[in-house]
Image (cartoon, helix red, strand yellow):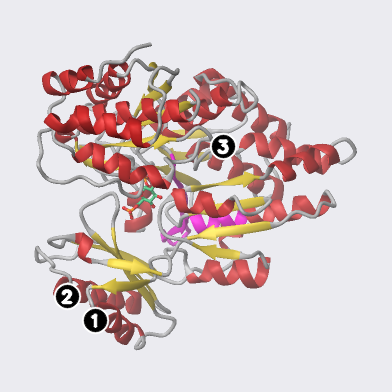
Amino acid sequence: MSINLRTVYAFAREMYPKKSTAPIQYGTAGFRGKAEFLDSVMYRMGVLATLRSRIRGGAVIGVMVTASHNPEPDNGVKLIDPKGEMLEASWESIATDLANVEDSELEAHVAKIISDNKIDVGSSSNVFVGMDNRYHSPRLLKAVADGVIALKGNVREFGIVTTPMLHFFVVAANTRGAYGQPTEEGYYRKLITAFEILRGDNLENGNYRNKLVFDGANGVGARKMLQFIKRMHDSLQVDVINKGDGKINENCGADYVKVKQGVPIGMPIVEPYTRCVSVDGDADRVVYFFTDDKNQFRLLDGDRIATLVADYLMDMVKRCGLDLSMGLVQTAYANGGSTDYISNTLQVPVACVPTGVKHLHHKALQYDIGVYFEANGHGTVIFSENAKSLIKAASETSVDAKTLLHVIDLINETVGDAISDMLLVETILNHKGWDVKDWLATYDDLPNLQLKIKVQDRNVITTTDAERVCVTPVGLQEAIDKVVSNYKRGRAFVRPSGTEDVVRVYAEAATKDETESLAYEVGILVQQLAGGVGPELIH
Ligand code: G16
């Protein structure tokens, strides 16, 4: 196959010219920004995915068009490597350079990537593309597909899917079906079969009731949950809200519920303690919440899911009589209450890494069973090949090991998957006979608060020690330390967001009032020392 790189430039000039001179950076989960400036970025990521597939011997690479938790006018792109992980870290700078190069330099720049990486451009290349349901996603998906076509790669379009579904398809195709079938039906079948086997006839148990409210954030998660419901044999009673009538993530969804610590728009009147679930715009995050009999909002976030899952898996592994290492991976946002509970009560090793599932996933691979969750509800469990083969062997004689194999099938190991995670939580709560009250009683969260601060250039803030310590601007960390020392159980950190043009502030302390005061004090320090713009701090 001969490839003329002139075509790459011709497509770019005619159809996807670069419209913005502002540099764009590969962030926490790929590129994000206002949709109107992203056509050229998408086209170039199609080109990059095609080259990446070639360097990986023709293995499928995924490209997901989504801005996940961001507001509806934003869009973005996530790249998926052959094993379902996010794009390899060393390629992030290649992606950034390619996204920023001028149109006139594109041909030469692509030629340089090819020669630097010794890519055989005649070899086969396979790219899967999917998108969320933003109104500009079809246009941007076409740009990705044209990038693949410009380099004569094979492109398969999956249309509107959740991000974790696309990860699933990539791994299913690359394992030639061993992980599942790379189709929507294959995905539903694998998860629903495992869930219904685990549930059996036992739809309710102890305090567990078979009923929940699902906030779909007006995103693709709502659509796919409805598809799940159609295919499930009444094994779970789900009332879906925010199905797509409103704007994606506006006053609803996992990010809103977690950050605002309140119920989403459109909540029906439900009995106190009804289990409610919120997912984000591309359904890779999930949090639980409920209101109690005093109408008080209570959140069960990613930390709660992680602890519930780790506790359950440890118990199952013990019952199977297996000796497997388990670790739990969190970020600086993990509530201090959860970290104490994991270390002291569960006695599971806990690691802290920078924000971004790419970091958590990487760390979790070090254990036989790696449980990783960000507090915002983004996470999953990964099992090593060693763990899987020991569990499989044990399943010959142990019912618990057999159950564990179904649990593995229920988990989308490729990346955090809101619906798969939710089905896992439902399985565990049912198994334990727990309602949300029982779950919440496992440990106490410290009151916590997040703020967003607008600054001139968020990159002036750099951090170390898994983002818990601020290195620049010089003096900011000392000032934060001084403020924090005045608060009982106080902890706070600041970091630049990798998905939005803001600096994030996190604070926790012994009481709600102290937490608010600590967050605002730190927020003001950021405004003063890191070039704050705009008068207000955004909660
Ligand atoms: C993405 C990442 C998450 C991260 C979140 C916020 O989520 O996948 O790992 O926690 O962004 O990142 P930041 O604080 O850097 O803006 P999503 O759901 O938007 O893809």
Circle 2 residue:
529
Badge 2 amino acid: Leu
Marks 2, 1: nearer the viewer: 1
Whether pointer 1 and pointer 3 mark residues with C-beta atoms closer than 8 Å, the reply is no
Q: Nearer the viewer, residue 5 or 152?
A: 5
Q: Secondary structure at mark 3?
A: loop
In the image, taking residue 257 as reference, residue 378 lies left or right, namely right
Q: Secondary structure at mark 2?
A: helix
Badge 1 amino acid: Gly
Quick check: 14 above or below 34?
Answer: above
Circle 1 residue:
475
- The answer to whether mark 3 is within 8 Å of ligand 1 is no
- From the top left corner, tell me how far across and down residue 244 is, in percent: 31, 30
Badge 3 amino acid: Asn
- From the top left corner, tell me how far across and down residue 91 is, in percent: 37, 42
Q: Nearer the viewer, residue 397 or 360?
A: 360
Quick check: 13 above or below 503?
Answer: above
* Magenta run includes residue 260: no
- The extreme top residue here reads 1
